[in-house]
């Protein structure tokens, strides 16, 4: 799995295991006592200092997107316990890619390439893969030291943590396991489905495959669209028996990691399909870890 980002109009892929989270560009940044190309300063992230590096400047690219409209990808090297905030134009979502289908390139007379030594083709565009170990090998690169309280290692199962893509649909928050995601698909027109089914809004065409797209709210017992949309963005998941199924969404927020034991069941008052959600009964948690009930 890769996080797909836009950097100066180019596509860049970052291994999902090296992404801790994605956050909006902060309202203000603090200067660091260094002045190096691409180093923007530092942001405060949950009371921690996170250095910010302009990915476009680091790769020698230019972009006209204002800083306030960009996204910060928190990149992590779990082995070295190092983190930094990589500033990119936009997070395009998550995609899966077989490494055996990647092309390899190099430059005569140069050492390893930070990005582009491996690449793949997606929708007719070349996507360069960023090499996180090489990123943290860059001279004069500021980084934050990972504290014991932060989230890592990031592999599913390590330290009991799993990764999720946090999305939204009509102001309802949804999270899909990274391990089940085939791809995130931007806004595309919906075609009529040859098979009539209650929550099915239609079919989308993706890389030569017709994928049914479901009304997430209706399927998960969270309400419904009340009208069939003409187009929708979606998350395509791999079905257990083979094939793909897409769930309608309208926003990608970020990538989050949490421990399995911290997942809570969706209260029945919110959804009548709690069997479709992962989690556990909050009343089974120790009293000091129970959520505060809302009036």
Image (cartoon, rainbow, N blue to C red):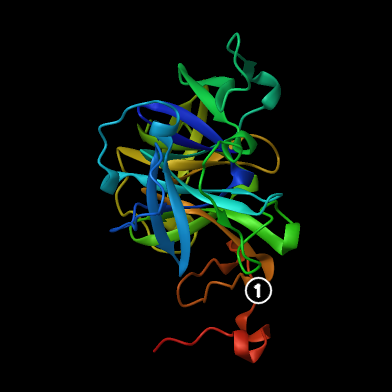
- Which residue does the image show at 61% across and 34% down from the upper left? 134
Q: Dot 1 corresponds to which residue?
A: 280
Percent position of residue 198, x then y = 45, 49
**Above or below, 281 relative to 48:** below
- Which residue does the image show at 41% across and 40% down from the upper left? 36
Judged from this view, the residue extending furthest toward the top is: 108
In the image, 156 versus 267, the foreground residue is 156
Q: In which quarter of the image is the C terminus?
A: bottom left
Give the structural element (helix, strand or loop) at label 1: loop
Q: In which quarter of the image is residue 279?
A: bottom right
Q: Quadrant of residue 8?
A: top left
Horizontally, residue 30 falls left or right of residue 241, namely left
In the image, 143 versus 5, the foreground residue is 143
For residue 249, say whether it is visible. Answer: no
Percent position of residue 135, x then y = 57, 37
- Which residue does the image show at 52% across and 41% down from the upper left? 140
Percent position of residue 204, x then y = 44, 31
Q: In which quarter of the image is the N terminus?
A: top right
């Amino acid at each position: 799995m890769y996080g797909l980002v836009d950097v100066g109009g180019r596509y860049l892929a970052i291994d999902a295991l090296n992404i801790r989270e994605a956050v909006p560009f902060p309202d203000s940044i603090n200067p660091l006592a260094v002045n190096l190309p691409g180093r923007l300063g530092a942001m405060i992230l949950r009371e921690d200092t996170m250095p910010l590096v302009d990915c476009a400047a680091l790769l020698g690219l230019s972009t006209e997107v204002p800083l306030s409209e960009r996204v910060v990808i928190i990149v992590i090297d779990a082995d070295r316990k190092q983190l930094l905030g990589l500033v990119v134009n936009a997070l395009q979502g998550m995609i899966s890619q077989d490494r055996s289908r990647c092309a390899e390139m190099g430059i005569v007379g140069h050492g390893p390439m930070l990005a582009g030594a491996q690449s793949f083709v997606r929708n007719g565009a070349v996507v360069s893969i960023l090499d996180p170990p090489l990123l943290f090998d860059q001279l004069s690169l500021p980084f934050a030291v990972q504290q014991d309280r932060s989230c890592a290692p990031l592999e599913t199962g390590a330290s009991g943590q799993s990764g999720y893509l946090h999305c939204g649909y009509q102001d309802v928050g949804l999270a899909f396991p990274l391990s089940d995601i085939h791809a995130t698909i931007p806004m595309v027109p919906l075609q009529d489905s040859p098979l009539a089914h209650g929550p099915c809004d239609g079919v989308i065409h993706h890389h030569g495959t017709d994928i049914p797209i479901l009304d997430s709210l209706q399927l998960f017992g969270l309400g419904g669209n009340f009208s069939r949309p003409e187009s929708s963005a979606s998350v395509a998941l791999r079905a257990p028996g083979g094939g793909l199924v897409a769930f309608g969404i309208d926003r990608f927020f970020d990538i989050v990691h949490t421990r399995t034991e911290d997942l809570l069941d969706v209260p029945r008052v919110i959804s009548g399909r709690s069997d479709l959600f992962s989690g556990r009964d909050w009343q089974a948690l120790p009293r000091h870890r129970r959520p505060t009930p809302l009036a």
